[in-house]
Image: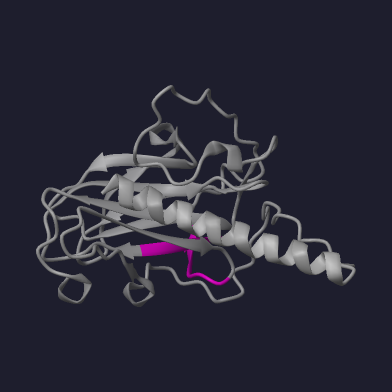
Amino acid sequence: MIATFQKALFQMKLSHLQAASAAAALCMVVACATPPPPPPPASLSFDGAAGCTQNIEAHTAQTVTIKKRQRAGTLSIIAGPETACQVVNETKLPYVLYKLPGSVEISTIQAGGVFEAKRLFASEVVTLDAELAPVRTFGPEAFLQRGGTWSVFFPSRANERYVLIRANPDLIGKAYLFTEQPANPAETQIGTAADAGPKTEYSYGGYVFARVFLEEPAAVGPKEQ
């Protein structure tokens, strides 16, 4: 299962390298005047142009699916101006809502932000029940650097049906202080901390993810979940 996930990451990185090699070869034939775009900076403000609501909206949810006979599934999304947002204490906060798969027994969940060169989504994770009522909230003290992610990792409860990743305004603009990479990084990692730059700031925009682990391999595919 872990090997399959790492293989997919390797293939994705390989495709990027192949594309870069092709572009470099083309530049040898035709002078390239356009340099590659710089990595996106941290978003230190958010205006909620997409329209914010007081409540979390179920229709915005993205389902984390798991392939048949697999024991884990991951969904990564860029949070920011294009995603939903909520008004909390008169502050507009972008969020991503993940719906957990049904018809399978979930053991643990990992969720949070993914390190980028200049930004890290300032995540707060909240689990919700079927009626979108909060069950548990995970603040900064619950997050750890796990490989290329800043995330929480926790056992699932039976009444938790959604995972909400929402911006934490108290972190915006602060620089993330990297910890020393452990000798044996958690197998739940996505990418590596080397993807991040010397100054990675907490941001209103950036990649977030949710990963679900099952007690047993999924007996049904995504359409049945």
Which of 221 and 121 lies nearest the eye of the viewer? 221
Q: Was residue 79 drawn as part of the magenta stretch in this picture?
A: no
Tell me if 43 is positioned left or right of 104 in this view: right
Visible in this render: residue 117? yes
Image height of 147 relative to 58, above or below:
above
Residue 170, image x, y percentages: 56, 43
Image height of 11 relative to 27, above or below:
above
| Residue depicted at 46% across the width and 37% down the height | 147
Residue 3, image x, y percentages: 32, 46
In this rendering, the count of numbered labels is: 0
Identify the image's colour scheme: rainbow, by chain, secondary structure or one colour. Answer: one colour
Visible in this render: residue 89? no
Q: Quadrant of the C terminus?
A: bottom left
Residue 22, image x, y percentages: 69, 66
Which of 224 and 187 lies nearest the eye of the viewer? 187
| Residue depicted at 69% across the width and 37% down the height | 199
> Which stretch did the figure color magenta?
82-97
Quadrant of res 104: bottom left
Residue 156, image x, y percentages: 19, 47
Instruction: Tell me which secondary structure the magenta stretch mostly adopts.
Output: strand
Tell me if 158 is positioned left or right of 109 in this view: left
Which of 190 and 210 lies nearest the eye of the viewer? 190
Tell me if 76 is positioned left or right of 41 in this view: left
| Residue depicted at 63% across the width and 62% down the height | 46
Quadrant of res 194: top right
Which of 159 and 105 lies nearest the eye of the viewer? 105
| Residue depicted at 36% across the width and 34% down the height | 186
Q: Was residue 83 drawn as part of the magenta stretch in this picture?
A: yes
